[in-house]
Amino acid sequence: MQNPAQQLTPSIDPILLQTNMTQAMLLWQRFVARLLGNAMNKPANEGGQGDNSFAEAIAKWGVNLLLHPTAVMQANMDLFSSQTKLWQHTTTRALGLGHLSPGVPDITDKRFKHPAWQEHQFTEVLLQSYLNMSTYWRTLAQTAGGLSEQDAKKAEFFINSMIDALAPNNYSHTNPQVWQTIVETNGANLVKGMENLLDDFQDGQLRIRMTDMKAFELGRDIATTPGKVVFKNELLELIQYTPTTAKVRQRPVLILPPWINKYYILDLREKNSFVKWAVDQGNTVFMISWVNPDSQHRDLNFEDYMQAAISAMDAVEAATGERDLNVIGYCLGGTLTAATLAYLKAKGDDRVKSATFFTTLLDFAEPGEIEVFLSEAQVGSLEKRMEKDGYLDGKDMGAAFNMLRSNDLIWSFFVNLYLLGNDPMPFDLLYWNSDSTRMPAAMHSFYLRNMYLNNCLSQPDCITLSDTPINLGKIDTPAYFVSTHDDHIAPWRGTYKGAKLFSGPVRFVLGQSGHIAGIVNPAAANKYGHWVNEELCDNADDWLFAANKVDLSWWHDWNSWVAKFSETEVDARIPGAGKLEILGDAPGTYVRQKV
């Protein structure tokens, strides 16, 4: 019996198709006019001197290829061979002799998983030719002997970005899925796609919507764990969460999230909220919600954030009556946590009894893929751009991170929104990712130069904060480091180096997946496992080789570890019952500030 879906043959309405194609073209012309108008009205000197480091790296790479004729010749021969097999395969198929066809590689790239790519010989040839050319250019991109490491990485990144941008699925006339959708909708998808494009082009820039930004509301759908704001200053609001157990661990937990993004990555929805889960384990949990800075915050520096974190610790003591506490730092928040611990150690302050670090770099010798955007010239150019407003727009930083995963975070949405004409799907994680924050100019400049460019934090007394030299080697606070295997923002081998800087006991755990999914890995789901090794080996790879795999979320392991530093239980603490008055409901006001 025939599948009912196969009985539905799309019916093309020539008049409707022509009408939609004309409307789509008019919308495209409107977009181009807006784009050109913005370019003409933009001041010639806006943003200062641009960064030419990628162009220079490509030029050096091109000249360098002349010094490697053997490698170039081999790449040419490999391309000729793969293309010859493809044409032989195509010819034998066209003659009905497919069983005699030479093999071509199976297509595993998820960009081309739609069945429409396999239905036509033309698209098969187009796709396989693209994949062959991609292999060719990636091979040449790696022919970098004689270049500096930085130029080689920049050239390779640029070439890979171009390869991704030129993929046939990114263009309506070479994407059979788009052709099929045009037939099914009589071209309505192109009209909707152009409307989406115009909607996303605001203030002279294209901001691709990854999700439906109207589908969520803070405090209603996400950031919903009950709590109260109990402290506030210029830089932060402090949230104390409402207990769910009659007894709680005596030592409270203070979380320092990164201020690159908003705190609620750890409190998305109840089913994947680390905050909610930690409260349910009997912890009194406090969360810092950083301000979304603007021009008035331009002179705030890294040490201002450190002092704000210390003020939050003081507030936790006022709220609970407990001076001792356990702290958690995530990413940049972890970098701040380590610097703060070193500062407190120098001051003889031992209130922090344990410290947990989520995907945190302390030794920036291996900073990950973001390194391609970090050179003296690029940082200098960025500083000039920040001079006008006094901050870095969070969307600019988000765009840079998206470029590191352009197929997943740019082109897939481009195709879905503008070619297929679909509406963005509601997704809590992507909503958070799009809810960006600004970065104060002084702080961001300090951070890029002292951490990424000069790797000062890993060196004793190389950084001075509040007139105090910082030495991570003197930190003897018990520490728990959790990193993730596929993290491209804080590579785990780099975070491992940072874990070895401390002088106290350290437990290192490696989770599966990446920077976000590997951390937001609910204990109830146990989607990703983790590796554990009780010994902190000299080398990260040796550590992993000897590690044991556990098919559970690392949340379980952390809970057992942190419980050792707060064995005594007390009656549950209700926000507002201590010395601090309630200033408002969670999630507070700072988190609602938009860019």
Image (cartoon, helix red, strand yellow):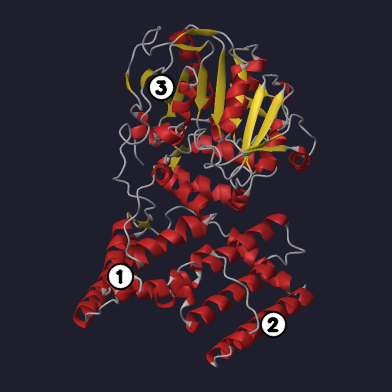
For marks 3 and 2, give the CA distance.
63 Å
Mark 1 in CB contact with mark 3 (< 8 angstroms): no
Establish if 318 lies above or below 42. above
> What residue is pinned by disc 2?
81
How would you rate the neighbour count of disc 2 (Cα within 10 Å): few for under 14, some for 14-19, many for 20 or more?
Answer: few
Q: Position of residue 467 (x, y in %)?
A: 62, 20
> Could one spot residue 364 in this view of the protein?
no
* Closer to the camera in the image, 234 or 377: 234
Q: Secondary structure at mark 2?
A: helix
Image quadrant containing the N terminus: bottom left
Q: Position of residue 353 (x, y in %)?
A: 62, 15
Please name the amino acid that badge 3 sits on: Ile
The residue lying at 33 percent from left, 15 percent from top is 582
Disc nearest the viewer among 3 and 2 = 2
Q: Earlier in the sequence, mark 1 or mark 2?
A: 2
Query: What kind of residue is marked 2?
Result: Ser
> Percent position (x, y) of residue 577?
37, 8
Return the mark for residue 190: 1
Going by the image, does 152 lie left or right of 445? right
Q: Position of residue 398 (x, y in %)?
A: 47, 48
* Disc with the residue nearer the chain's start (3 vs 2): 2
Q: Say which mark, if any, is on residue 239.
A: 3
Residue appearing at x 61%, y 83% in the figure: 86
Regarding residue 446, the answer to whether it shows in the image is yes
